[in-house]
Amino acid sequence: MKTRRIGLPPFLVLATALLAAVASSAAFSPAAGQTVEAGERRTNERQPPGPIMDAIGLKLGMVVGEVGAGQGRFTVHLASRVGPAGKVYANDIDGGGLARIRERCERDGITNVETILGRVDDPLFPRDSLDLAFMILTYHHLSRPVDLLKNLAPSLKPGAIVAVVDPDPVKDSDGRGFESTSREEIEKDAAAAGYELVRLETFLSRDNLFILRVKTPAPRRTMSLADLLR
């Protein structure tokens, strides 16, 4: 006995396709007033700003330092999340990219972003200013990552974290594994710079999210009289 396959009515097929398209486009939805630049939507779907900012604990009023801000793809989302009471220091070594960020912020009415032209070994953020430092698709480009992390530390407030989003050498399937950062690499750099990896998030399809924090020195043991007399 043959089993008869019953297809969906045409209107249901069309509705299903439309819902799938809407779900895909909704993976990234820009905040009100933000303009998505050409070529950014696809990257934002790969690295959705909302879930990433949730994972790093970004909240209203926080001060963020973005290392390697480029032309501001993620900067505008950080600025929207921290709000008028917060601030984003957008760092890069490319003055042209920073000029593009300033133009973009002026056009979109974003007033809580300040650009900083840094060096390859120092982002030059203000001292003791940051609740969080952030970099996305940047770490594997750093020519002196250990020096940069060392020079970043003085700008961090006590307890601040450094959040790094970078391609995973295994999950990144476009064949550009050399443009990636492994857990082993970042742990080695972090240790050399005085940090430790405190969390690794793997929810992104092609990237990892590393959370670093400056190591707190072990408390010094108080010498007792008995110790001194030994």
Image (cartoon, helix red, strand yellow):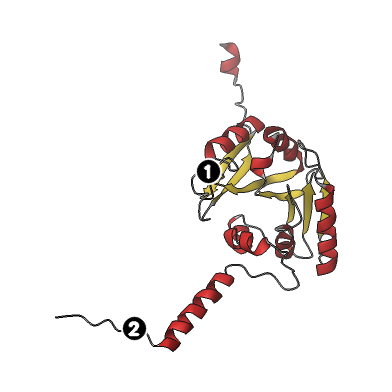
Amino acid on which the number 2 mark rests in the picture: Gly
- Residue at image point 53% right, 46% down: 175
Asked whether residue 115 is in view, the answer is: no
Instruction: Give x and y (percent) for residue 99.
Output: 85, 55
Instruction: Give x and y (percent) for residue 116.
Output: 83, 48
Examine the rendered structure and indicate whether residue 143 appears above or below residue 8: above
Spatial separation of the CA atoms under disc 2 and disc 1: 42 Å
Examine the rendered structure and indicate whether residue 164 appears above or below residue 5: above
Q: Can you tell which of label 2 and label 1 is closer to the viewer?
A: 2
Q: Quadrant of residue 27?
A: bottom right
- Residue at image point 62% right, 27% down: 220
Q: Secondary structure at mark 1?
A: loop
Q: Say which of 230 and 18 sits in front.
A: 18
Residue at which label 2 appears: 7
Residue at which label 1 appears: 169
Residue count near mark 1 (Cα–Cα under 10 Å), binned few <14, some 14–19, many ≥20? some
Q: Residue farthest to the top?
A: 230
Residue count near mark 2 (Cα–Cα under 10 Å), binned few <14, some 14–19, many ≥20? few
Amino acid on which the number 1 mark rests in the picture: Pro
Examine the rendered structure and indicate whether residue 30 appears above or below residue 182: below
Asked whether residue 100 is in view, the answer is: yes
Instruction: Give x and y (percent) for residue 63.
Output: 75, 54
- Residue at image point 70% right, 70% down: 31
Report whether 27 appears left or right of 129.
Answer: left
Q: Quadrant of the N terminus?
A: bottom left
Q: Quadrant of the C terminus?
A: top right
Examine the rendered structure and indicate whether residue 77 appears above or below residue 70: below
Instruction: Give x and y (percent) for residue 69.
Output: 74, 51
